[in-house]
Amino acid sequence: MKSILVLQGPNLNLVGQREPSVYGRESLTDWMTAQLPRWAREGAEVHIIQSNHEGELIDALHAHGFKADGIVFNPGGFTHTSVALRDAVAAIDAPVIEVHLTNIYAREPFRQHSMISGVCAAVISGLGFAGYEAAVQYVLHH
Amino acid sequence: MKSILVLQGPNLNLVGQREPSVYGRESLTDWMTAQLPRWAREGAEVHIIQSNHEGELIDALHAHGFKADGIVFNPGGFTHTSVALRDAVAAIDAPVIEVHLTNIYAREPFRQHSMISGVCAAVISGLGFAGYEAAVQYVLHH
Amino acid sequence: MKSILVLQGPNLNLVGQREPSVYGRESLTDWMTAQLPRWAREGAEVHIIQSNHEGELIDALHAHGFKADGIVFNPGGFTHTSVALRDAVAAIDAPVIEVHLTNIYAREPFRQHSMISGVCAAVISGLGFAGYEAAVQYVLHH
Amino acid sequence: MKSILVLQGPNLNLVGQREPSVYGRESLTDWMTAQLPRWAREGAEVHIIQSNHEGELIDALHAHGFKADGIVFNPGGFTHTSVALRDAVAAIDAPVIEVHLTNIYAREPFRQHSMISGVCAAVISGLGFAGYEAAVQYVLHH
Amino acid sequence: MKSILVLQGPNLNLVGQREPSVYGRESLTDWMTAQLPRWAREGAEVHIIQSNHEGELIDALHAHGFKADGIVFNPGGFTHTSVALRDAVAAIDAPVIEVHLTNIYAREPFRQHSMISGVCAAVISGLGFAGYEAAVQYVLHH
Amino acid sequence: MKSILVLQGPNLNLVGQREPSVYGRESLTDWMTAQLPRWAREGAEVHIIQSNHEGELIDALHAHGFKADGIVFNPGGFTHTSVALRDAVAAIDAPVIEVHLTNIYAREPFRQHSMISGVCAAVISGLGFAGYEAAVQYVLHH
Amino acid sequence: MKSILVLQGPNLNLVGQREPSVYGRESLTDWMTAQLPRWAREGAEVHIIQSNHEGELIDALHAHGFKADGIVFNPGGFTHTSVALRDAVAAIDAPVIEVHLTNIYAREPFRQHSMISGVCAAVISGLGFAGYEAAVQYVLHH
Amino acid sequence: MKSILVLQGPNLNLVGQREPSVYGRESLTDWMTAQLPRWAREGAEVHIIQSNHEGELIDALHAHGFKADGIVFNPGGFTHTSVALRDAVAAIDAPVIEVHLTNIYAREPFRQHSMISGVCAAVISGLGFAGYEAAVQYVLHH
Amino acid sequence: MKSILVLQGPNLNLVGQREPSVYGRESLTDWMTAQLPRWAREGAEVHIIQSNHEGELIDALHAHGFKADGIVFNPGGFTHTSVALRDAVAAIDAPVIEVHLTNIYAREPFRQHSMISGVCAAVISGLGFAGYEAAVQYVLHH
Amino acid sequence: MKSILVLQGPNLNLVGQREPSVYGRESLTDWMTAQLPRWAREGAEVHIIQSNHEGELIDALHAHGFKADGIVFNPGGFTHTSVALRDAVAAIDAPVIEVHLTNIYAREPFRQHSMISGVCAAVISGLGFAGYEAAVQYVLHH
Amino acid sequence: MKSILVLQGPNLNLVGQREPSVYGRESLTDWMTAQLPRWAREGAEVHIIQSNHEGELIDALHAHGFKADGIVFNPGGFTHTSVALRDAVAAIDAPVIEVHLTNIYAREPFRQHSMISGVCAAVISGLGFAGYEAAVQYVLHH
Amino acid sequence: MKSILVLQGPNLNLVGQREPSVYGRESLTDWMTAQLPRWAREGAEVHIIQSNHEGELIDALHAHGFKADGIVFNPGGFTHTSVALRDAVAAIDAPVIEVHLTNIYAREPFRQHSMISGVCAAVISGLGFAGYEAAVQYVLHH
């Protein structure tokens, strides 16, 4: 059984409620919860943590980063500025897959650079919920 | 009765104590508390929240942003860098008026750009405590 | 009785006629003229000058800047480039409140920097006509 | 009969006299005056205004911009810096064709960006006097 | 049956041969050819085109872009500079998924910006061969 | 009889089919072919070449550049990046008129600089098909 | 007896565990705890606080900044971006010595600028654990 | 007898009244008027023009620039931005000496570049009133 | 016998014909052909390829790069922008010597940076035809 | 006995005489000479060299850099620009500790970057004379 | 009697010999020597020092800067880069007048910024030898 | 007999001793001395000067620059910053060939721009000792 952390950054609790023209109306949490049994059958024990607090995200990376087999991380608005999150990702053992619901490279200029990507294993941007699926599959099979 | 949130960012708890040559010696909290009865008579129920934690400010925006009639927001030092706060402001329904005690455009270069302004309804900078008054009046009458 | 100059820069004579989706359909001059009696009752003698000529704006700042109690200044398109207007504002005694109808920080990049703000007492941007009201009140009560 | 304004910015009164190696020795005004009868026969009533004063150019755009069928505008040295002229062009109804005698993109770096082009219908640069002809023809036939 | 084009840019014919420490030793073409029967069973008719010529890539986008259900595109070194490829992607009907074998955001600065991403549906970077799989699956299921 | 080459860069074969809100629905090739008899009567033998291959455009400039009386060149997406095309234009004898259907200076920032303009005789941008007409007329009469 | 706060920012709880090639294998906390008796004998009462939460660091600066004789501060990844921490350092009375284990000026470009240094009394970078010693001695003797 | 124009830009009418800590308390006009007889004895007929209007400065350069022996020009705040004044200086025959009362290179960054200097014969900055004297002497003896 | 490829980029077929004040009047091809017998006697079998097509240059690097002893490469206008050529040079085994006829560092700013140099063994710029000689000699003796 | 070179760059001979509000009134040389006996007792033979000549500083680094146990280097104004000193520091065996009397990161922007730091072992800035003490102790104990 | 140092930086020994089209053919030293008797009669004892060594210029500023009444300094090529010379100028008591023979603001971009000007009393650029005269007169009369 | 100066900048006396992984272990001086008899036989009288002092390099350029037939110059770390050396190279008659042992364009960003190249005849970078040979041969035969 592989252990995977899905870590959700600020404002992602609002997906399904916020800016539906951009993110759609389905709740990300509902969708993800619905996948848990299937992921379990495929061999992945998936934990989901969401926080609007940068410090809690760092704490979660420390807590899971030395025992999980992989981390699927959507850092939300912290993506573009947080050196502390970058340091936390670099410090842990588990490979991190950065995921964004939308294609950030097609949005405002300040969203087109990620401070985190340089220490992640891979980046998936714009596949919507399917991006999480692809990241989980990648950890499962590598 | 209109519901208004006054949201205060980091270090604003020190106003009246910190750098009096810049911010004066009166406590911002004392002054604001003193206005509450008058604002109530004019038809505004005003809530005041101050925090040095970015995550708590995001939480507060989420909690009030779908039911308040307006939010008066001084993001303090987070003004210049926080994409997560920008996303929170963009995600909620209530219009946000950004307020700064001093004229930030007359200070150090790194203070002259606000990451938040682009998603606010308006910006008031340099009117001191009167900036909060103007913002509350604006929400009351629009 | 306090003496206040409201100084209007280029193209502001067109407000109410130009880009109604941005500025609305009401004439700024009509609105302001309608406030004059009230402002007089509140103790402010308000003069209004509009010009599309940078030199005339400088001349007006020189003429009023050593006797007015405050100047409410919307520099229009000169906001972003005019060192000469900045010098004129810096040279006079009266405090200057910079006002913009729209939130300039939410528009094109070249509109997000003001060459004038660094020598103004305060900046109000995005309150529409109410910005002039707030600025007049500020001069009246400080 | 179509109404066309040809608006000439600063220093263009010197063409034919100034820097002949760059602009040639023929007076632009003489040439343009000579075309008036032909343009009239082709259906265009052309007015020509030249000014070294930015404010007068704005005034002229306001005066003609809501009744002319098109404006042929060489903003001269104001091309590269004037937000106020850009605003005036954006505020009026008539389409504006920006014209430069020389190819500004082959000159000094500070001449290679136009603050005006972004709100013009088209730009013609480097055709000499023929640029005015092409612009007038364009307004005539569109 | 869905029609999918996998379009490979310059130097990708060398994968498996070139810089094995970066790209591994397996030939990308061999791997992809081996997937064709499975993809066919899953409902995707996949065409593979590789070229070192920018013009041939544009021609291929034109030829397939109005009839394919999706295009999986690794533009190689053209990623970072080609406006012509961007225009071709923008001009066609089929959604384009940009794929890179390595995480380009962790490489040299000039590789961290893609001229193409802004007009793609999504970007996958750093999943190795699995990135092609994820992109094909995405087209299959959306 | 004057010899003129009209040289069309990448993606211009799609005009009339691609992004009609930007470029219109008429095929550029059809329109241009329809003008050939008239241009012949006016004294111009016009050759039309379109290619999506940078190298073929260079070859065409070499082949015609020492015998044509003028070249009307729309470099498409190569406009903004190609030093090789700039060198080819600089190397030949025929004057080159750069033409763009749309006003590139009113589009994305990366489209507002042309690498080619600095060695062209003139630039026409935003006149649509009429830009080609104006360029051909210019070569005919100078 | 002098009162000194040693304030440790994000990820510093991992030192001794994380990236040993960069930071060594000894735990920073262990080492520091071992110095406490000696520092006490030399006249310094040293408090140690570590947090991954920016808000808690601000709270700590507020709590100790008006009574401590000096603060030794390693802001970790917040060094490079936090205006809020800079404001907190500027607001308090105690002098702050910024300390980094490694020589940050020899690392990635984004680590070579500190947002905090401009309001600190001094900066020590690259002395490893000895940097804390030097900072404590400095507060003790000045 | 040599003919010299001293041309004064915006706000220079305030010298002696404005910012005495920077410019001193003596009126520049008074001082200059007092020199006229001496300059006449030394062979220079000096005309003095001051204007806050960019267009009037251009007009003055046109009017004197083809008959004066030299022009001493303090462009004030227009120094840093005006391409139109640069064009006017470049267009005339008389050599122009740019003069600033203060050392502009020791002031704010936006004052340290002059758009005019590149077409002037010389620049004198920081000599106070003596800068005008030196410029007049230079024209007299060259 | 050593095998050497001399690879010539766009427009170099025109040397001797184009801009003689810059490149001289002798044909580069003629000169190089004349050296072949001597180079053969010295032990070098030299192949010469010239193309205006970036893709053909990449193909040539692939074809020769795993069997030649060295490649002398003048990338012409592709020097400054081509990541694809850089990737091809990096992918092959043969050392590449970059050669330019003129001293590119003394020309326009956009010519002073080479995208290729970072993966070449050496760069020779400004020696004219002798640069090819020096590069061939270098491959012969190392 | 450890051998330590203290190397002082330009203008440091004036400390105690120059800008006392910045550097204090005590002579740095006097203070350092007074420490020599104590340092000798602690086991350090310290040599002090001061020069205003970049070349002499390089010569001194060469002369001591292969036999000293450590070098304490205050490069003064050469800190910010000298690649030659950087090369000399990189070329020698002895570890170099860069020291500045004041906190350079709190001064003018051009002083906030050091060309030398990237090849030093550590940097101490703003501890005054105590910075030299800390550096000497560091060499003594490591 | 006033004491004045004229300090000449690198390559100024060649004036009269080097680039006569830029600097003229007269030797600067010869001219200056010829002025010494006149300057003596006017009350100035003038010393002239020229050196190509930055360190010697610093030494000279130290030696004369605390006893001369003024220093006329042409830093030559060190103008644009030397922080050490800037520090030396800032450290001494004598006012420094920076002089350049040519108008540096009309030359290459890297010559248009002076690292020294910010700490000089005034700058004279482009008056040729007369610049030295004006500077000496300024020291004599202030 | 041709007279050639080989001028070596700072730290080049250490080649063969310093960073052997970069520069190799052979002394450059030894190698060069060994070539002197051969160069004499081929017709070149070669003088070799090395200095770590910028001023001495300028003096050497002045001393040899008007009588040597060519100068082979490796400016070492002064390459990237010295305007004074650039001026000296521009002032002399002898053509200068700039030589670097390593390929500077493949090293740190601050090493990839040379302040000297713009006034040299040619640049050779990365050929090791053979670069000096190629430069001497070039002077011998041109």
Image: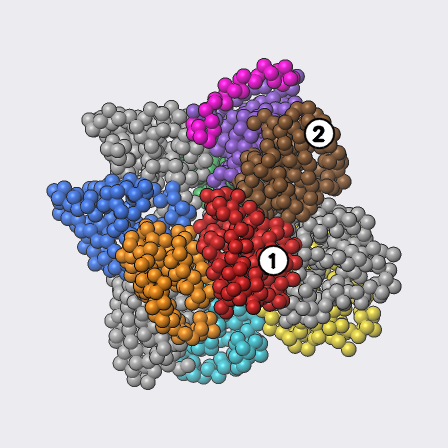
Chain colours: A orange, C cyan, D yellow, E red, G blue, I brown, K green, L purple
Q: Residue at x 17, y 43 (%)?
A: G35
Q: Name the residue type under label 1.
A: Leu
Q: Residue I36 carries which label?
A: 2
| Residue E88 image-quadrant placement | bottom right
The location of residue G34, given as percent across then percent down, is: 16, 43
Label 1: few (<14), some (14–19) or many (≥20) C-alpha neighbours in 10 Å: many
Disc 1 target residue: E85
Please identify the quarter of the rendering in which residue G26 is found. Answer: top left
Residue I39 drawn above or below residue C134: above
Between residues L113 and G63, which one lies in front from this camera angle?
Answer: L113
Q: Quarter-wise, where is residue K67 in the image? A: top left
Q: Is the same chain shared between marks 1 and 2?
A: no
Could you tell me how far apart the alpha carbons at marks 1 and 2 are, in whole angstroms?
A: 40 Å
Where in the figure is residue I89, as x and y percent of width and height?
A: 57, 41
Front position in the image: A34 or D16:
A34
Which of the two discs, 1 and 2, sits closer to the camera?
A: 2
Across and down, in percent, residue D111 comes to: 63, 55
Does residue E63 appear anywhere in the picture?
Answer: yes
Image point (46%, 82%), residue name: C35
Q: Which residue is drawn at 49% across and 47% down?
A: E26
Q: Mark 1 lies on which chain?
A: E
**Quadrant of the drawing holding the C terminus of chain G:** top left
Whether residue K121 is visible here, answered yes or no, is no
Q: E141 and D58: which one is in front? A: E141
Q: What stretch is highlighted in magenta?
A: L18-44
* Secondary structure that dominates the magenta span: helix
Give the chain of mark 2: I
